[in-house]
Each structure stands twice: as C-alpha cells, then as structure tokens.
Image: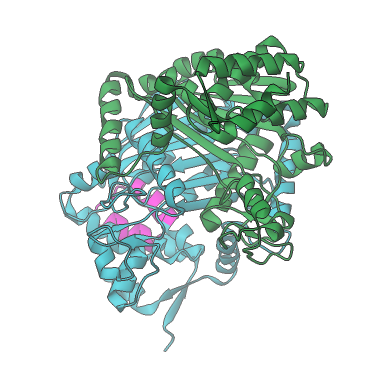
Chain colours: A cyan, B green
Amino acid sequence: MSEHITLSPDEVRALSYRILTHHGLSEAHARVIAEVITQGQRDECHSHGVYRLLGCVRSVREGKIDPRAEPSLRHISPAVLEVDAHYGYSLLGFHTGLPLLAEKARKQGIAAMVIKRCFHFSALWPEVEALADCGLVGLAMNPSHSWVAPAGGRHPVFGTNPLAFAWPRPGGHPFVFDFATSAIARGDIELHARQGKPIPEHWAIDADGEPTTDARAALQGAMRTFGGHKGSALAAMIELLAGALIGDLTSVESMAFDEGVGATPCHGELVLAFDPKVFLGPGYQAGLERAEGLFAGMARDGARLPSQRRFEARARSLEHGVQIPRELLEEIRRLL
Amino acid sequence: MSEHITLSPDEVRALSYRILTHHGLSEAHARVIAEVITQGQRDECHSHGVYRLLGCVRSVREGKIDPRAEPSLRHISPAVLEVDAHYGYSLLGFHTGLPLLAEKARKQGIAAMVIKRCFHFSALWPEVEALADCGLVGLAMNPSHSWVAPAGGRHPVFGTNPLAFAWPRPGGHPFVFDFATSAIARGDIELHARQGKPIPEHWAIDADGEPTTDARAALQGAMRTFGGHKGSALAAMIELLAGALIGDLTSVESMAFDEGVGATPCHGELVLAFDPKVFLGPGYQAGLERAEGLFAGMARDGARLPSQRRFEARARSLEHGVQIPRELLEEIRRLL
C-alpha cells in the first residue's frame, strides 16, 4: 500500500474548501484559504499545504478568530489603503484590498496597504506573487510572536518576522523570495526537540542567553536572528514598519494577546507595491531587460534563484498531481 | 609629540569646505559634502570622515564626476520624485530633493525619491537621519560595484549594496541602522591583504569560487553576502529596486561604466519616506510609544541598539572635539 496519495490541485482545493466551510469559515474566507493551501501543496511547501488545515480548524475552535469576519477598507491617502480584518484571517483582507492597492500603485507609482487586526495565515510569497501577477513589484512583512532574541539580548523580543519580495517577469515566474528573519523556522527546532537531535549553535540561545545545541533548551530560551546584528536590525525594522507605524501589535504584544492559547499570531501586515511603468515611463522595457540581465548573472554558475525549487515543484504538481502522506490525508478527512 | 590632532567639528567642516572648493567643487556640493564628512568624523566613522577627502579629490581629478553639476527635479507622481544628479556627487541631489520628498510623504503617507546618475559619496545613515529629523521614517538603498557573489555563485554580481533605515524618536537620537549586504566592507579585506592577515572563511571566495582565508585571493575572487541566501536575496532586491526599477545602473553595469578607472561607483539610489502621522492619525503618540517599548525590550539585557556607539562618539566629539591622526591631517592639508 502506497504511503502517499496523489491528488490533483483541484481536488486539494475542493477538499480544503469543504473542511473550512464545515468548520464555520465563511465562503469568502474558505475560498481564499483553500486557494493558498492548494498553492502551498502544489509548490511542495508541505508545512503550508493541507497540513495547515489541522492548525486552521484548531485555531477557529479556540475561538479567538472570527471565521466569518468581513474586512472593511479605508482610504488613508491616495497612496495608502487600510484594511481592517476585524480579527479574521489575513488572506481575505489581502485579497479584498489587492485591487485597490494595485490601482493606487498604478496611479502613484508607489502605494502601501496596511492590514490590521488579522490572524496570520500563510507564507507571504502567495501575496507578493499576486502583486507580480498584476505587473507590480511587491514587498510584504509582518511581526509574529516574540520567539526571537535581538542581537546581544537574552530574551525574546522579535517574531520570526518574514520579509517577502517579488519582481514581475512577464511571460515567466516572478523573481520571488520570502524568508524569516529568524535563523530558522520555529517548527524546525520543535522537530529536533521531538527527535532528540542537536541543533546548530547559531539557531538559538537557552534561558540564560547562552548559545545552545539542545533543542529543548532552545525552546525554553529564544531563537536567534539570521545574519547576526544585521538580521536583528531587519527584524526590528519589521516590528516598526508592520507594527508601530501601522498601529498594530508588535510580536511581544501579539504573544500577550494570545494569552497562552497558542493560536496563530494576531497582528498587522504591511504590503508595499511599486509600479515599474510609472517609475520607468518610456524606459519600462529597458528596465525589465536590465532585471533579466541581473537574474542571468545570478544564475551564471548554475546557482538557483530564490523560489526556483518551488517553481519546479509547481510544474511537477500541475503535471502529475500532488503527493500527500496517507496518514495526514486520513487525519484531515476525519475533520469532515 | 601627539600622534593625533584635536579639531572642533567646525574646524573639520571649514577645512573640508576649503579643500573641496579648492579642487573645483561648486559651493553647493562642497557645503553638503563638508557637512557629511564632519558628521562622519564626529561619529568616529573614520573611513567616512576627513579620510574621504583624499578619495574625493582623486575621483574629481579622474574626470568622471562633474564637480559643479546642478541636480534637476522631476515630479513623476504625487508620491514619487526623481532627482537627476547629472553625474555629480549624490549628496547634493539628496539635499535638493529632501524638502519635496518630505512634502510628498506628509501628503501621501508614503513617498519615494529616486536619485539618478550620481556618484556615491557617503554612508546612507546621514540621509535617513535627515529624514528622521523631519519626523519621517526613512529607508534608503543603492547598488555599488560588482564585488559580491550571489549565494551559490562563483562570480561577482552584486555590489556591497547598503540598506539604511531610520525611525524618529522625538527628543532623542533616531533608531538607525545602515549596513552593507556584503559580509564585510571591501576595505576590511584590503586591510587584511596589506597586513598579510588571514580573513574569516565566510567573508569571501577565491577566483575558483572556493571559500578562502587568503585576503589577496579574496580580492581576486568575490566577497560573499552576509547571512547566506537571505543576505543574497536582499542584495538582489537592492539591485532591482535601486537599479532596474529606477532606470539606473546595476552594480555590474556601474563597474563597466567605471572602465577600470577605480573611481567611486556611479549609480542610482532609492529613498523611501513614511509619515507616521498620516499612517497613525490620532494613534500617532501611541505608535511612537509602542516603538519605544520595542527599543526598551531590545536594550533590556544591556544590548546596544544599532548606531548607539556612533551616538556616544557624537556626544564625545561635540564636547571634546575630534581626534585626527597627525599624518592623515598633514596629507589632507597638502591638498591645499
């Protein structure tokens, strides 16, 4: 008996939608979440695929998230849009605001979308990719829960604070990256703790602030940022731009707001969009060609561009379907 | 005989201004450059202090830089300003555009200033600090010369591509960082090469793409980015946002434009400004207090905030004057 079941992306989407609506999410929320789960599974980002359904249903049951919240929009200025997610998941807020963000960027060249009071759902790459699909350059960031110590500190202050960027490449996949400013994902440390395996020294510190290779001690202490004081500075910038600047929670505040429930973090998000057509005017084509020259230089020695592995997985999945561990799929189907 | 001479910041400014105008810079260029050299010396960023006068005079003699170029402004949109530096130094372009950038940010909440065809002069922190002095949040970046290999690559593609950020703290120094996305400054590798000292393995690769501890081999090869593939992704973003998006040179193109002369890099720069008063409205004070809470958390264990050492040096210099090595000062005075 195969340990994996093959499903088509359409089957993943339909199954996800059924489970989400079954557990009380509104059709609008269920549609965008099912889509991003399908995208995660399709791109073989397994932690962002159907596995997420388990956490999503658990988080809704915990009662902090409003599964039927309808986002509302407010124009702060011709270049800034605010989306209030009203304590629903972030994705519907993003998709509700996206057409207006794109319109602002096309008029102004640069525009910002603030999403407030949302529960974090997915990775940020689906969002910046959606901007690139509109021909725009996208930059997105958010705080999370305070698990990460600043450079030189002993206590957690920052979240894993992801930063995602996309550059449109007409006729091809965009140039996309999406990384946590923590040295590693928290889930990786949890996995090592479960398996009793040591972790590399640069991942975390223990409760006394000392570097540790003991995954359990790391979970009692704090994760570290990537890249030393530079990564720490970036993590702080994300707390400021996607927390203090937009009037929403920092990672420390988001952790306090959770009250130990362990739900997905509640916070805000900042999304910036740039329209190269406005910036470049008649030099638009030349600007895109210049970017292609950069990508060719980066790939010259056979190096992969960021996200390239994901795009290769996408091509495989669209042709052959996605592989889901039988046990996981059974657990998910029991949610119905 | 003391090896250092003490000068007041005013004396540094006056000396710098005399030397710059003596070597053909217009009064407008000389004024802003003398100011930023004084700031560098005052903050004990020695490579950005009076030492820069030597390179500045050399670069002007090489003939690529127009020492009297007058920047021109173009409104691309209500939120985007373009400054053409006409192959002069970047700083005058920045200061010519700054009041209009601030005005756009105050109206729109977010605004961008593109500086094109400029020769890089200084660190970026004086620029983002100038934005913070206007009560704005600043973010600035630029490519440089292609000295840095992308993650997985063997050849230089990126510049040292600095990223600088400032958050205003009314009544105090702003929160500021300014870091190269390369693992280290190129000057540090040159210094190790001159002294015959080995370099850490994560700084650079040799001409065959292998990590090296030999500083001379590193100078023939390529520097590495900080933070592995994440730092590499950031460096690429800076090439795109402050090169391709604004219709100016990437670091590879800037290196080619130099034609082996070894002048300071010619390229563009992107400066973003955010007005917290627009984003936060009536929540402005609460937003600033939230940021202060973040800074207190970061400093809780005695850790220094980025730039804190610079601010401590500033206080010392303003009280006691700046120390300049006698030999360097004599070399500089011989320029008159």
Q: Residue at x 25, y 26 (%)?
A: B286
Q: Main secondary structure of the magenta part?
A: helix
Q: Residue at x 69, y 64 (%)?
A: B209
Which of the image's four quarters has the N terminus of chain B? top right
Q: Is residue B295 above or below residue B10?
A: below
Q: Nearer the viewer, residue A308 or A7?
A: A308
Is residue A168 highlighted in magenta? no
Q: Nearer the viewer, residue B12 or B300?
A: B12
Q: Is residue A298 above or below residue B257?
A: below
Q: Is residue B1 above or below residue A14?
A: above
Which of the image's four quarters has the C terminus of chain B? top right
Is A257 left, or right, of A134 in this rendering?
left
User: Toward which corner of the image does residue A270 lie, by quadrant?
Assistant: top left
User: Toward which corner of the image does residue B50 lie, by quadrant?
Assistant: top right
Q: Residue at x 52, y 14 (%)?
A: B10
Residue A271 image point, x, y percent: 45, 37
Residue B166 image point, x, y percent: 44, 30
Query: Which residue is most to the front?
Result: B1
Range covered by the magenta-colored residues:
A14-36
Is B223 left, or right, of A217 in this rendering?
right
Q: Nearer the viewer, residue A160 or A100?
A: A160
Residue A329 visible here: yes
Is residue A21 highlighted in magenta? yes
